[in-house]
Amino acid sequence: MTLEDDDLLSEVELTTTLIIAASESDDHLTPEEIDRLLGVTPVPPSAEVPLPRPREK
């Protein structure tokens, strides 16, 4: 029986990538650099979905 959690392994890999990049950088990583390292595609402002309004009591 193997104990594997694919989501956890992915999280550890992403965290490791960020730690290595941060330790090799002379300055703070920019949000754009972090997005690139994590494979995140930023949403353009015009495509942002508005947050739902809170329910009225």
Image (cartoon, rainbow, N blue to C red):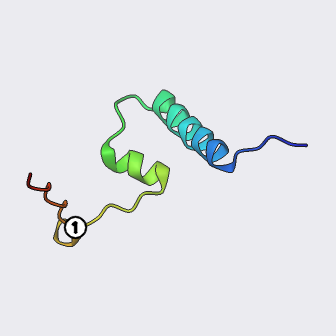
Q: Residue at x 38, y 62 (%)?
A: 41
Task: Name which quarter of the figure residue 8 lies in.
Answer: top right
- 25 left or right, relative to 19: left
- Figure quadrant of the N terminus: top right
Q: Residue at x 50, y 38 (%)?
A: 18
Q: Residue at x 29, y 64 (%)?
A: 43
Residue nearer the viewer, 40 or 36: 40
Residue 38 spot, x, y in % from top left? 48, 50
Q: Secondary structure at mark 1?
A: loop
Residue type, mark 1 in image: Val
Residue holding disc 1: 49
Q: Residue furthest bottom?
A: 47
Task: Name which quarter of the figure residue 12 lies in.
Answer: top right
Residue 40 spot, x, y in % from top left? 42, 57
- 53 left or right, relative to 23: left
The image shows residue 50, relative to residue 33, as above or below, that is below
Residue nearer the viewer, 39 or 23: 39
Residue 50 spot, x, y in % from top left? 17, 64
Q: Residue at x 16, y 71 (%)?
A: 46
Task: Name which quarter of the figure residue 49 lies in.
Answer: bottom left
Residue 35 spot, x, y in % from top left? 40, 51
Residue nearer the viewer, 23 or 2: 2
